[in-house]
Image (cartoon, rainbow, N blue to C red):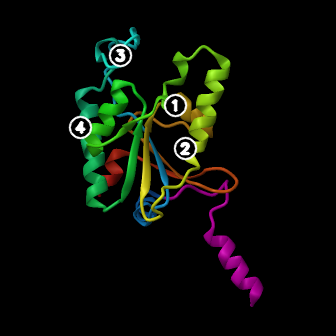
Amino acid sequence: MVGRVLALMLAMVAPAGAEPLAPKALIERLQAGGLVIYWRHAATDRSHDDYDLSDMTDCEGQRNLSTRGREQARQVGKGFERHAIPVEQVLTSEFCRNWETAHYGFGEYEIRTELYNLPIIQDDARREDLIEGLRQHLNTPPEAPEKNIVIVGHDLNLRHAAEVEIDEAEMAVFEPHADGPRLLGTLQPDDLMH
């Protein structure tokens, strides 16, 4: 009997290499709270890249959200409301495309310099600090266990910190764990509309 109970308990805990949850199951898991959502900024205007980052409050020198990207961000915010997914806080990189994604999605957000876009950094020690800092964010549960944390970030940062690659506007959902953050699955904005 004890063996069966133990086997059942182990089956309920997703091991590191477990199959990702389907969108419906992932949304249900988000409703319970305690997770960290890494949301890559919404779709951008690819007609130019970042070319002047001397003043991060000036969006002119950056690659910014497209009209589609602003709509995706609003769609995600509405999807969180529709599914009653609780959010404790929204953290974002200081790039305009990131804080605008956070703004259109959730309204309130906090800019964090440690979420800075990795490819811009040339100093190896600084790059390692950013990667390790993101790992810590992904593995830090919300203070209120019934809520979630949203991080609006960049692709390369996530690839280096968690070996996960996502497209613009896609979300990777992590469960903080003693062995490091566990990827539970990913969501597209459209997944939140059902």
Residue type, numbered disc 2: His
Residue 34 coordinates in the image, percent (x, y)? 49, 60
CA gap, disc 3 and disc 2:
25 Å
Residue 62: mark in rendering: 3
Give the mark nearest the N terminus, 4 or 1: 4
- Of the image marks 1 and 3, the number of the one nearer the N terminus: 3
Q: 22 above or below 90? A: below
Residue with the mark numbered 1: 114
Pointers 4 and 1 in contact (C-beta within 8 Å): no
Is 7 included in the stretch rendered in magenta? yes
**Image side of residue 79 versus residue 13, left or right:** left
| Outermost residue to the right | 3
**Residues marked 1 and 2 touching at CB (< 8 Å):** yes
Residue at which label 2 appears: 137
The label nearer to you, 1 versus 3, is: 1
SS state under label 4 = helix
Q: Image quadrant for the C terminus? A: bottom left
Instruction: Kindly state the secondary structure of the residue where label 2 is placed.
Output: helix
Task: Give the residues drawn in magenta, as a range.
Answer: 1-21
Residue 19 place in picture, x, y as percent: 59, 57
Residue position marked by numbered label 4 in the rendering: 71
Q: Are marks 4 and 3 in contact (CB under 8 Å)?
A: no
Q: Amino acid at mark 3?
A: Gln
